[in-house]
Image: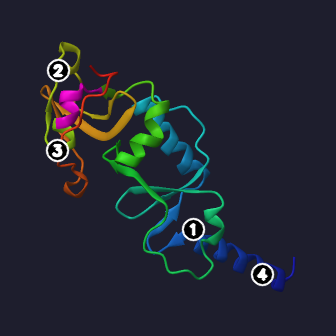
């Protein structure tokens, strides 16, 4: 291989690296992607296919984008944010956002807490929820996906019989919910 061919190969390699780096963002490579999926599987029992590009920023926050959207990355666009915010890696645990719980939750086989409609109302107001059943009260101190019926409400951390609300203030709902027929 000649010097010119080696230089071209080096330039192509740098372009691929640059495409993966977007203002502190990185597209997860195959090894990192497998580790991330393994974390979801270990914590939530998530085993479904995950056909998204996964980005991670310097703060450990993960965003997802469909494969077609990834074609625009690295074409000179100035990006502040990419895709849907899925959640954050915190000390070996993954804390999902509301959107993250909606993507992961339907495929989760463990790490899920189901709230009653009354508990849901308290949760949506941004308050911590007292866990009412003995099984719930004895949960290990870790993050859980939170749901009520078919609705995925985000992620909380169980601690001493209380589910700590990790929903940001901007996302609180300052209203009560009418009881539906299936909840009565």
Task: Report which residue position mark 3 lands on.
Answer: 125
Closer-to-camera residue (27/70) = 70
Q: Residue at x 40, y 48 (%)?
A: 99
Q: Residue at x 15, y 33 (%)?
A: 129
Residue ranking furthest to the bottom? 4
Q: Residues within 10 Å of mark 2 (few under 14, many from 20)?
A: some
Sequence order check: which comes first, mark 3 or mark 2? Answer: 3
In the rendered image, the quadrant that contains the C terminus is top left
| Marking on residue 20 | 1
Q: Position of residue 24 (x, y in %)?
A: 43, 71
Q: Is residue 117 above or below residue 10?
A: above
| Marking on residue 137 | 2
Q: Are marks 1 and 4 in contact (CB under 8 Å)?
A: no
Reply yes or no: does residue 95 show up in magenta: no
Q: Residue at x 58, y 43 (%)?
A: 50
Sequence order check: which comes first, mark 1 or mark 4? Answer: 4
Closer-to-camera residue (106/2) = 106
Q: Nearer the viewer, mark 1 or mark 3?
A: 3
Residue ranking furthest to the right? 1
Magenta-colored span:
114-121
Task: Report which residue position mark 4 lands on.
Answer: 8
Reply yes or no: does residue 119 show up in magenta: yes
Alpha carbon separation for disc pair 3 and 4: 57 Å
Q: Residues within 10 Å of mark 4 (few under 14, many from 20)?
A: few
Q: Residue at x 23, y 58 (%)?
A: 170
Alpha carbon separation for disc pair 1 and 3: 39 Å
Q: Residues within 10 Å of mark 3 (few under 14, many from 20)?
A: some
């Amino acid at each position: 291989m000649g010097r010119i061919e080696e230089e071209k190969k080096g330039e192509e390699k740098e372009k691929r690296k640059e495409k993966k780096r977007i203002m502190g963002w990185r597209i997860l490579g195959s090894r990192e992607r497998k580790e991330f999926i393994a974390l979801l599987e270990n914590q939530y029992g998530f085993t479904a296919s995950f056909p998204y590009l996964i980005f991670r920023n310097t703060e450990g926050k993960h965003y997802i984008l469909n494969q077609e959207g990834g074609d625009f990355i690295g074409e000179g666009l100035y990006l502040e944010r990419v895709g849907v915010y899925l959640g954050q890696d915190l000390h070996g645990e993954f804390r999902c956002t509301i959107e993250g719980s909606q993507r992961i939750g339907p495929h989760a086989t463990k790490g899920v807490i189901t709230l009653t409609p009354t508990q849901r109302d308290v949760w949506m107001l941004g308050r911590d929820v007292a866990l009412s059943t003995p099984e719930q009260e004895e949960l290990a101190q870790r993050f859980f996906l939170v749901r009520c019926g078919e609705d995925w409400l985000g992620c909380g951390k169980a601690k001493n019989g209380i589910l700590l609300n990790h929903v940001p203030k901007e996302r609180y709902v300052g209203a009560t919910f009418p009881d539906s027929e299936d909840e009565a």
